[in-house]
Image (cartoon, rainbow, N blue to C red):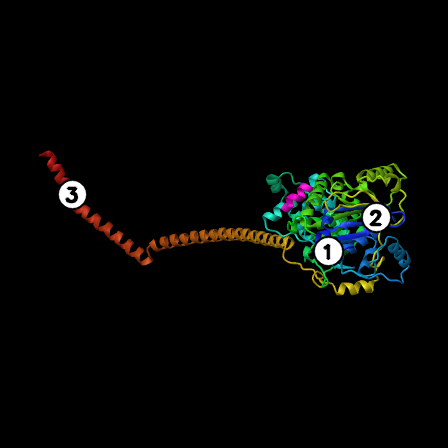
Amino acid sequence: MSDGSTASEIYIGLGGGGAENGPRQSLVLKRANRHGLIAGATGTGKTVTLQGLAEGFSAVGVPVFVADVKGDLAGMAMAGSPMSKMHEIFAARAAEIGDSEWAYRDNPVIFWDLFGEQGHPIRTTISEMGPLLLARLMGLNEVQEGVLAIAFRVADEQNLLLLDLGDLQAMLVWCAENADELTTKYGNVSKATVGTIQRQLLTLESQGGAHFFGEPALDIQDMIRCDDNGRGYVNILAADKLMASPKLYATFLLWLLSEMFETLPEIGDPDKPKLVFFFDEAHLLFDDAPPALTEKIEQVVRLIRSKGVGVYFVTQNPIDIPEDVAGQLGNRVQHALRAFTPRDQKAVKAAADTFRPNPKVDVAREITELKVGEALVSLLMPDGAPSPVERTLIKPPCSRAGPLDAKERAIIRSISPVEGKYDTTVDRESAEELLAMKADQAQAAAIAAKAQVEADKQAAIAAKEAAKVQAAEERERLRLETAAAREAAKPSMTEKMVQSAARSAATSIGRQVAGKFGGQLMRGILGSLFK
C-alpha cells in the first residue's frame, strides 16, 4: 500500500512482481465501491486474497464484513508469527514481489454469530426481513408467498409487531381462522396454504432460524466503525455451523446487504468506501433463486454503490454469478480453474472473455496453469477503466492465516466495542402476545355471553313459573272470595226462623183480609155490572 497526497490516490496493494508475473497490482481506494469478484477452484488461494484485501481496507480506515466459512479468517484478530509453518513461504513471497512494507500485524475484529456461540448474536425482526426474503428462506411457491404477504399486510393494518417466529406463527393461525373473511378482502386464502407455510416455518425453526429473529435487532452502524487508531473493524461472521443451512446463510447475507441499502444514506462516490462486504460462497445466493429475488439482488448490487458500500463476491466458478450482476463487478481476481468438464471449460472461456485483453497474457491458457497463490487480475484504474489483465502473485497476509482457539476468541470478544449489547434477548409485547390477549378476551366474552344467555333463559323459566304460581294463587283467591261472598249471603238460623214466622203471619193476615174484603169487592163489581 502506498499513500498519495489525497484520499483518492490511496491504493491497496494486492500483489504482483516476481520472475513470471507482471507489475504490482493495487486497488484504487476511490474505485473500491465498484464491487468485485474473487473466483477460483478450491485450494487455489481465494481465502488469502480475501484476507489480504480485508487487511488493506482495515488499515486505511474502511470497515469490512466477511463470512468465515472455514474458520480460517478468525486469525485476522492476531498478528502472524515467525514461528508459524507458513512463515518461510510468506516471507519468500513478500521478497519476490518486492513488498518491503510487509510485516506481521493484527487487525481490530468484532466476532458475530447467528447462534451466539462464537460471537455476538445477530438478530433481525420478521418485519424487517419481509415476505420476499422469508419466502425464499422457507422455499415457498408463488401462491404461498402471496398468502404470506397478506399476513404481513394484515399485521401492518392491525398494528401487530412481527418480531420473532412466534409472532409469525400466531399471525398465520389467525389468518387460518379468518380465511373466509381474508379471501373476500384480499383474494384466495386457504387453510391448506396457511398450513403449508406453518410446516415450512417449523422446518426453518429446526434449522436454527429462531436464533436469527428477535430483539435487540442489529444496528448496522455497529458494523461501520473504526478503532482508536483509525483502523476499520473487520466484522467476522462465524459461518461454519451456518453453512449446514445454506439457504439460511445466503438469505441472511442478502438481508444484511438489503438492510445496509435501506439504512445508509446516499453519498455518491466517496473517496473511500463506507464498508466493504465480502460474500463468500456466493453461488448459494443465486441457486434456485426465483426471478423476483434475482431482480432484488441486481437492484441492491447496482444501487448500494451510491451508499458507499463495495460488494465482493467470492465463488469457485465465475459463471455462478448471473450476467446482470457480474457486469457490475469492476475489480476482478481470477485464481486457477480446472477444465475437466464441459461446464469447467465454459467457465474458463467466460472468465477469459470478461477481462480486458493484454497481448502478453493468454488468459484461456494461463487460467488453467496458475499456481496456488497466483491469479489473473484486472482492477479499475483511477479513471474508472479496467486495467489490462495481468498474471499476479498475491501478497501474503500480515495477520495469522488460520483459526483461533476458544480462549483467544473469548478474549477478543470480551474487548469488543459492542460487548453486552446483543447478548440478552428482549421479548417485548408483539403480535403473539396481542393476538393471545385478543383470543383470551374473545373467549372470555364468549363465555360471558353464553353465561348471560343461560342466565336469561333461567330467568325466563323462573318468571314463567312465578307467573304460573301467581295465576294459581289469584284463581284460588278469587274462588275463596266468591265462596266467602256466597257464604256471607246465606241467612242465619235466627233470620230463617224470623223470616218463616213473618211469612206465616203474612199468609194468615192475607187470608183474613181477603175473606173480609173479598165479598165486598165481588159485590161491588157485580153491582156495577147490573146497573
Q: Nearer the viewer, mark 2 or mark 3?
A: 2
Question: What residue do we see at 75% from left, 46% from top?
Answer: 381
Query: How far is the residue under mark 2 from the one under mark 1?
Result: 28 Å
Boundaries of the magenta span: 145-152
Instruction: Compare marks 2 and 3 and give the one earlier in the sequence.
Output: 2
Q: Amino acid at mark 3?
A: Gly
Q: Quadrant of residue 358?
A: top right
Label 2 SS: loop
- Look at mark 1 in the image and give the residue it sits on: 63
Nearer to the camera, 518 or 286? 286
- Marks 2 and 3 in Cβ contact (< 8 Å): no
Dot 1: within a 10 Å radius of its alpha carbon, few (fewer than 14), some, or many (20 or more) residues?
A: many
Label 1 SS: loop
Q: Nearer the viewer, mark 1 or mark 3?
A: 1
What secondary structure prevails in the magenta region? helix
Q: Quadrant of residue 386?
A: top right
